[in-house]
Every structure is written in structure tokens, then in C-alpha cells.
Image: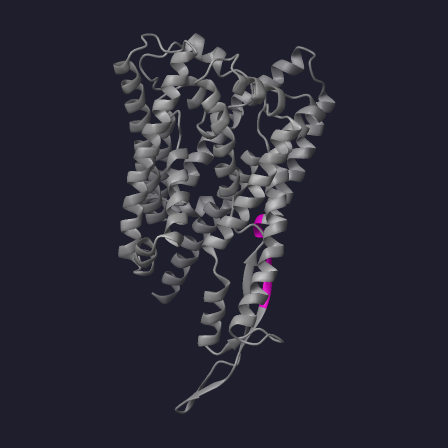
């Protein structure tokens, strides 16, 4: 891997892409320290204490607890993208645009940007009202709330632009790299907190060793599941066209175990945060907040079970959107292919659907276990300052693998160009 990075910096065009990506990520880190006007930092720290907002603070690179202009991170864009994917299946006009090719997808991307702004502004208004009720807003008035909402919305819009610029002119997926940078940037402070706990006698060296072993096992499991796939054999019949013979070769159809990636976790986390957001608008002694505190508090059994159920549900739902077994079966049939032992057409689609359902169940259960893992890690190791749970590891490992694959693809392409020349 290090050899590939060294070669990438020696290649002219790839070096420019890497430097542009690093510059955009630097802008993101600088923006994470620009505070939103009108916020009382001390009152905000008391409101956001605890682990309920830990994941969002990690994703935003600490911008959430600082409440900077990037406090909402790229979450509204992710939610808008998921909603647009769902609407593409339901709304015929959007489905037709999606089938038009690149031009249609550009229009859908523009709709996604508009949806991001709307979602970000609504979320920002809700957050500003919740902060006002908690005493974190210095001058509670309509203009102050609007100013906070506009600042947060502008920060999300800037992050969306940075992500798209990285995807277009840099290397890797821009949105994923922003989340990756936010998570990695929190590691030094987490390590510092662990050292303080060690020096204070709260934890021992055995706890740190146990944490390291668990982290290595999780990383190995994530790599295995992310790279794992079921290869369905596909045989293509021979065709004679004129004097030439086509086909006759054997290939395979790769079905990934974790085809949905980390999207089900992020979407499930957004829904799980919704009750807490509604409760923050009400009095702490209200019946709704009392119910959340008694039966649905963060880390409780009910919370973890419902969270795991949502992750498995959204895994199935998202895979059903991005992969259509009937279309795949028809394409195989159109080019004269068939799965050995299975009739072409609908029987092949049903067979692919059965295999995919089993793989999706395995992937969804794995994602659910990874998502609720931090609670067990904290109870086993006693380390509370390093909130670097399975979800964060899943994102970091997945983005690192995808980015390295793109770098190696560029290097391989340059090798072929040099050979041809």
C-alpha cells in the first residue's frame, strides 16, 4: 500500500489529484473550527455531554460539539441521496430520468442538492430551537435562530460542494473521504484521553491490550466481509456470426456480502436520533422525555434491539433498490448466458434473488453487530474516552480500501499507456 502511495506522488496527473484532495480536506478541517455565531459554548458543552451524540461528533470531526459551521456534517446530503434513490423507484418521472443515462443522472443530482438544502435548513431550525430551550443560545430571538440555521445550512452546502469537487477533480469518493477525515481527526484526542485514564489509574495496560486485540479482530472481520462475495457461475453459449465464433466461455456473477456498505447504519442512526431531537424541544420532565429515559435511553436493550432491526431492514431495502435480479437475469439471457442447472429468464432471477437474500441477511446482521459493538467494548475494556466503535472502523476501513483501489487503478492505467506508447 505504501509503495502505491509513493508511486502515486511520482505520477504527475495522479499527484495533482492527491494534492487537490488533501487541500479540500484541509479546508474541511479549518471550517470545523469556525464557530456558529450566537452560541454559548459552556451551556452547549453541558447539553451535548454523554455518548448519545458521540457518533455524529466523530463523523463531523469534532465540529458537532464545537458547534461550528460544519456541525451537521454531510448527513443532510446522505439523507437526501437516500430519499432520492427511494423516489427514483417510486416516481415514474425520476425512474425515466435515471434510465436516460448521464444527462438524466445530472438532473437527479441537482434535485438531490436542492433536497439537501431543504433538509439542512429544517434540521438547522430544529437544532437552533433545541439549543435555545437548553440555554445554549445567547440572545434568543427569531433573527438569532435564523442566523444559526443559515450558518449551519451554508456549512452543509459548502461540504457538499467540497465532496463533489473531490469526486470530480480529486481521487476517491468525496463524501466518503469527508466522513473518513472527520473520524481520523478525532483519534489523537481519543488516544490522549486513554493516556489520561491510564495515568489516573482508571484503566490498566490489560484494558488497552484487550482494546487493541478487539480492534484488530474487528478490522479483519470488516475487510473479510467487505471483500467477501458469492460468485455465481455463468456459462455463455457459442454463437456463429459469419465466419467467427463468439461466446462459449465461463464467467461468474459477483454478489457482495455487504452490498449496501455503511448507508443502512447512517440512515438508521438518523432515525434513532429523531426521538431525542423531538424530546429536546420539550421540557425535560415531559411524559415523552420520561418515556425515552426509562425505556428507550441510549445503550439500553430496547434501544439496541430496535437499532439493529432498523439496520437489517434498511440493508434489505437499499439492496433491493440498487440491485434488480430480474434486470440482471434478462441481460444474461440477452447475451446468450445462463446459470448452469437454472433455466434462463425468471427462474434465473428467482435463483439470484434467493442467493442475494441470504447474503443480505448475513451482511445486515454483521452491520447490526458492528453498530451496537461500542456498548460491549466499553463494558469489557472500561475505556470511555476513545469512542471509536465498529461503525467508525467500518467507514474508515471501507473508504481506505476503495481509495487505494482507485489509486492502484490509475497506476495500472498509466502502466498500460506507457506500454502502448
- Give the residue displayed 49% in from the left and 42% down from the top: 263
Percent x, y for residue 337? 51, 76
Compared across the picture, whether 50 is left or right of 173 comes to: right
| Horizontal side of residue 414 vs 283, given as left or right | left
- Is residue 302 or residue 299 the one in the foreground? 302
Percent across and percent down for residue 340 are 61, 75
Residue stretch rendered in magenta on the structure: 226-232
Please give left or right for residue 376 compared with residue 21 in the image. Answer: right
Query: Can you name the residue that lies furthest to the front here?
Result: 287
In the orientation shown, which residue stands out farthest toward the right?
206
Please give the name of the residue rendered at 46% of the width and 71% of the height, measured from the top-left corner: 330
In reply to whether residue 229 is colored magenta, the answer given is yes
Residue 252, quarter of the rendered image: bottom right
Note whether residue 1 is visible: no
Q: Quadrant of residue 290?
A: top right
Q: How many marks?
A: 0
Amino acid at each position: 500500500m505504501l509503495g502505491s502511495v509513493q508511486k502515486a506522488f511520482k505520477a504527475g496527473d495522479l499527484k495533482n489529484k492527491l494534492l487537490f484532495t488533501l487541500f479540500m480536506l484541509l479546508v474541511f478541517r479549518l471550517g470545523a473550527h469556525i464557530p456558529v455565531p450566537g452560541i454559548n459554548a459552556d451551556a452547549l458543552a453541558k447539553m451535548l455531554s454523554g455518548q448519545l451524540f458521540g457518533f455524529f461528533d466523530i463523523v463531523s470531526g469534532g465540529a458537532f460539539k464545537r458547534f461550528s459551521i460544519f456541525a451537521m456534517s454531510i448527513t443532510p446530503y446522505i439523507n437526501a441521496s437516500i430519499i432520492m434513490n427511494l423516489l427514483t423507484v417510486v416516481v415514474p418521472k425520476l425512474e425515466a430520468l435515471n434510465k436516460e443515462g448521464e444527462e438524466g443522472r445530472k438532473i437527479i443530482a441537482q434535485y438531490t442538492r436542492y433536497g439537501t438544502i431543504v433538509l439542512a435548513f429544517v434540521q438547522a431550525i430544529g437544532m437552533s430551537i433545541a439549543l435555545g430551550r437548553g440555554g445554549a443560545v445567547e440572545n434568543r430571538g427569531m433573527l438569532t435562530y435564523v442566523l444559526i440555521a443559515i450558518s449551519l445550512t451554508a456549512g452543509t452546502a459548502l461540504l457538499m460542494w467540497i465532496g463533489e469537487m473531490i469526486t470530480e477533480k480529486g481521487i476517491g469518493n468525496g463524501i466518503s473521504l469527508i466522513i473518513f477525515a472527520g473520524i481520523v481527526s478525532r483519534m489523537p484526542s481519543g488516544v490522549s484521553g486513554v493516556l489520561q485514564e491510564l495515568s489516573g489509574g482508571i484503566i490498566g495496560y490489560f484494558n488497552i491490550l484487550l482494546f487493541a486485540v478487539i480492534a484488530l479482530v474487528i478490522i479483519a472481520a470488516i475487510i473479510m466481509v467487505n471483500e467477501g462475495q458469492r460468485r455465481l457461475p455463468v456459462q455463455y453459449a457459442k454463437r456463429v456470426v459469419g465466419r467467427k465464433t463468439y461466446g462459449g466461455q465461463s464467467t461468474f456473477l459477483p454478489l457482495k456480502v455487504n452490498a449496501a456498505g455503511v448507508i443502512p447504519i447512517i440512515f438508521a442512526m438518523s432515525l434513532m436520533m429523531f426521538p431525542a431531537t423531538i424530546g429536546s424541544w420539550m421540557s425535560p420532565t415531559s411524559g415523552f422525555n420520561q418515556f425515552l429515559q426509562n425505556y428507550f435511553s441510549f445503550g439500553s436493550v430496547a434501544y439496541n434491539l430496535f437499532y439493529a432491526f432498523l439496520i437489517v431492514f434498511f440493508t434489505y431495502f437499499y439492496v433491493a433498490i440498487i440491485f434488480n435480479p430480474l434486470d440482471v437475469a434478462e441481460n444474461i439471457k440477452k447475451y446468450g448466458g445462463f446459470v448452469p442447472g437454472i433455466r434462463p429468464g425468471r427462474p434465473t432471477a428467482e435463483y439470484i434473488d434467493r442467493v442475494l437474500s441470504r447474503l443480505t441477511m448475513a451482511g445486515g446482521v454483521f452491520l447490526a453487530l458492528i453498530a451496537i459493538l461500542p456498548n460491549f467494548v466499553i463494558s469489557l475494556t472500561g475505556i470511555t474516552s476513545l469512542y471509536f466503535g465498529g461503525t467508525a472502523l467500518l467507514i474508515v476501513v471501507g473508504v481506505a480500501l476503495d481509495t487505494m483501489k482507485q489509486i492502484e487503478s490509475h497506476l495500472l492505467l498509466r502502466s498500460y499507456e506507457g506500454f502502448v506508447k
